Image (cartoon, rainbow, N blue to C red):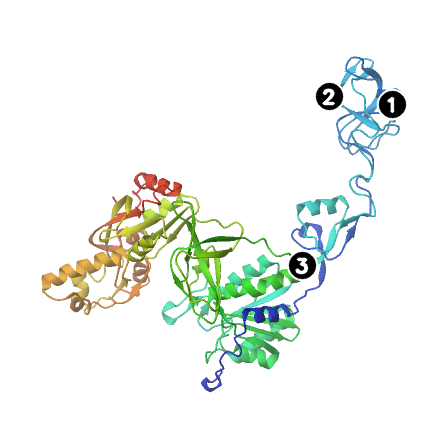
Amino acid sequence: MVAVSDRKEFRDLATPERAHEVVDGLDIDPGAETVPLDEARGRVLDERIDATLDVPGFDRASMDGYAVRAEDTFDADEASPVTLSLAGAVHAGERPAVSVEPGTAVEVSTGAVMPDGADAVVIVERTTTTDEGVEIRTAVTPGQNVMLSGADIAAGTRALGPGTRLTPREIGLLSALGVDEVPVRAKPTVGILSTGDELVRPGEPIQSQAGQIYDVNSNTIAAAVAEAGGAPELYPHVSDDYEAMERLLRRAATECDLVLSSGSTSASAVDVIYSVVEAQGTLLLHGTAIKPGKPMLVGELGDAAYVGLPGYPVSALTIFRTFVAPQIRDAAGLPEPATATVTGEMAVRERSEEGRRRLLAAGLVENGDGDLLVYPVDKGSGATTSLVDADGTVTVPADTAFLDAGETVTVELFSPDVRPPSVLCAGDSDPVVSQLLDGLDNPRFLPVGTHEALRRLRAGIPDVVVAAGPTGESADAVELGGWTREWGLVVPAGNPDGIEGVPSLIDGDGSMVNLATGFGLRTSFDAHLDALADEREVTRSELTADISGYDLTTSGNESPARAVAAGDADAGLGLRATATALELDFVSLGRQRVRVLTTPDRRDKPAVERLAGAIDAVDRSEFAGFD
């Protein structure tokens, strides 16, 4: 373990341009390999392939009909057909056993070998069979309705060149040439290591109380590597231990073209990976002037290139997409993916940290006039949902202090297929809301709580707000509909502590988990406490001082109930519907009104109109405590 006295700050905070230059200079060329044709789709040819035979390898009929000598039909027309005697038939896949002599015809099917003597085909629709043979009612010219040998591709022709990406079309051509294996660019093997004592692989038991979190980066980066054309290789999780990290990095460096690690790249005293890279290879860069992504390492480990990504998932994926993915695509021979940008107006003012270029995750929404608005989606680098909730990024130059509301910005979309949500909804989570949104195409819901959602509604960001509890008047808000829900305290099955209400928490020794301020349940809970404080002639703060866990808050409506289910609390603020779903008991404290609100300029949006129609039609029977 690196001692505190050995702590090293970021070395150079390279500019983004310098970081690109350093990463572009890494050698991750995987060379070439030969793969079976049935595994070649999506791969990139490493060398030219020439045709070694004619395709087709014979003159063949391109239509059902009769093979003839064209000169025997020159006088034929509808008014005076020519009758030829029928000499036989040839079907696809057969070697002709007959030939066409003057005055004769041979029946042929599409793809059949043209019999000797024939140089054209009369389509069956322009013929009539008779007792004398076949009546020809049209003249044909030599070669008509015939594909000559080599007409598709001739032997010696350049079929496909190096750098060609093999799609089903190219696979078909190679199949026609009889090619069963092809030389392609090898996929660069990319070793992926997630570091940190707090990480647990998905599927394994987790101890949240001990600060453990699931390893997000390993699978996320592996998927991104595969998408970029690389071959991801996941390595075991490694703790922040110098010897363990050194062994795993050395192993990965001998097995991979590129090694990616996430975490252990900052200047923290427990972050040791830069020391390992310095000791075992060459450290080329430590730190970039970009947000998110300041703690970035670039170096070489033996014959392998190395890039250290930040530990926070959003930062790690952003740095990967920006700097590493282009190198993997280039090494695999793949072109840059199709990109798309859109312009829109900032919906709100957004401050930015001067001195570092910022890649601002941003969401899109259309206002009532169809104009595109851009809003920041920034929950901090540690939030894994920021990029899921966003549609792209806005590049904010290092010398920019803020983006002003109404300012025109360019958004680089994560994919050309990205479209603004049909309806942007924000507010309190609710089972009925989830069901309503399931019936809409491409909705987006931001569970920010009632207070924050109403603030955003006033700023003109969301189309719809789910407001729960006492909210006061919302200027210019239009109500689409609503319902009531039963709220109270979720307690363990059987209510072993005999909790009968809030007084049980005040006067007893039970603990609770609360919701953060701004959520509808918390607002109703605090109003309930105010009423109780008035009865006891004390202040609310005097009451809450006696409630163990009152200040222990979460921002998820189900989180307190799940803490109860896990045995971490004796009670949790929640809904009867949640208690029923988790098979817990429930102590009712009242009913709460839920309203779905919009603004006049968004009321006529098609998805808002559909949502309004669905509110009254939704089946609430499965949600206990709803009416």
Q: Residue at x 49, y 56 (%)?
A: 411
Q: Is residue 215 found left or right of 586 in the rendered image?
A: right
Res. 476 in view = yes
**Residue pointed to by mark 2:** 125
> Residue 210, image x and y in percent?
38, 71
Give the Cα separation between the discs numbered 1 and 2.
20 Å
In 3D space, how far apart are the residues under numbered discs 3 and 2 (Cα atoms)? 50 Å
Viewer-proximal residue among 53 and 26: 26
Residue 458: x %, y % from top left: 31, 53
Q: Nearer the viewer, mark 1 or mark 2?
A: 1
Q: Which residue is mark 1?
A: 71
Q: Which mark is residue 333?
A: 3
Q: Nearer the viewer, residue 21 or 132?
A: 21
- Report helix, strand or loop for mark 1: helix
Q: Looking at the image, is mark 1 or mark 2 earlier in the sequence? A: 1
Would residue 623 appear left or right of 384 to someone viewing this image? left
